[in-house]
Amino acid sequence: MSTAQRNQDALESLRNIGLFSSVKDEDLTSVASLLIERRFPKHKTIVEEGLPGDYMYIICEGRVSVSKLSDDGREKILEFLEAGDFFGEMSLLDNAPRSASVRALVETRVMALSRTDFLAVLRRSPDLAMAVIQELTRRLRQVDEQASSLSFQRVQERTRGLLQRLAKEESAAQTGRRATPPLTHQQIADMIGTSRETVTRALKDLKQQGWLAQEGKRYLVPSEDA
Ligand code: CMP
């Protein structure tokens, strides 16, 4: 394969990543030359809460969790991220330590961009800067939602809201339902800030109501709700 063809292929795969979808070809070509591919095995910590940040990462394949340690030492999962998502941008933007830890849940391939290159690319490409701002705004909205649901909603409603948010894929097993990624009761409990036992009860109730179904460790929610 010629170098030109390889560069074209690299551009095409970057184009498929939401963050880069509206970036001009010439900007994308210069970004492509700055990205460093890295692979992390399952369970490996990619970014550690409290440490200084030097790189941001774009997920090409795999899945990661974003989590924070609470004052009593419990881990609270904030989000799961998958192919096409990015992380590690916050400490590059505000120079503060890493806000959370990011761990590979399965073998994960990422493209890393150094602080200097990320900041230079953002200055050069308003399209990329806008895509980053839009994603940060979406995350802030989500955090706002979670903050209000923590204070006002009962555990069953919080469980339901979380599963609706995580169910992105159409289920192959049951038509009319969307599937979440594989989840343990403990992970759900950590994400909504309650105990595993309370989640187990809430899931049982939601199943008895006919709203929730399960396929292995994936939860199936009605498509029209998701
Ligand atoms: P940074 O603070 O550099 O390192 C941890 C990363 O986790 C952070 O950048 C974000 O990319 C990501 N992160 C932190 N909080 C959230 C959240 N609520 N939702 C999604 N990603 C987050």
Image: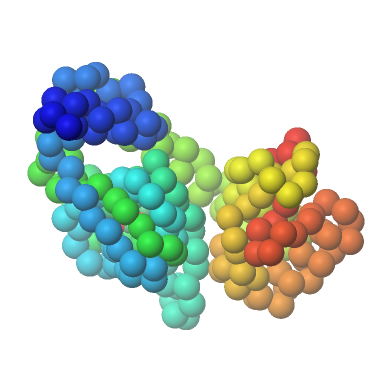
Horizontal side, residue 222 vs residue 20: left or right: right
> Visible in this render: residue 50?
yes
At 75% from the left and 35% from the top, the residue drawn is 224
> Visible in this render: residue 128?
no
Horizontal side, residue 173 vs residue 121: left or right: right
Horizontal side, residue 31 vs residue 133: left or right: left
At 51% from the left and 49% from the top, the residue drawn is 143
In the rendered view of the protein, which quadrant contains the N terminus? top left
At 65% from the left and 75% from the top, the residue drawn is 195
Residue 17 image offset from top left, x and y in percent: 36, 34
Quarter of the figure with residue 41: bottom left
Horizontal side, residue 33 vs residue 160: left or right: left
Residue 145 image offset from top left, x and y in percent: 58, 46
The vertical placement of 187 against 135, above or below, is below
Looking at the image, which is closer to me, 41 or 113? 41
At 56% from the left and 62% from the top, the residue drawn is 191
The vertical placement of 137 against 200, above or below, is above
Residue 58 image offset from top left, x and y in percent: 31, 45
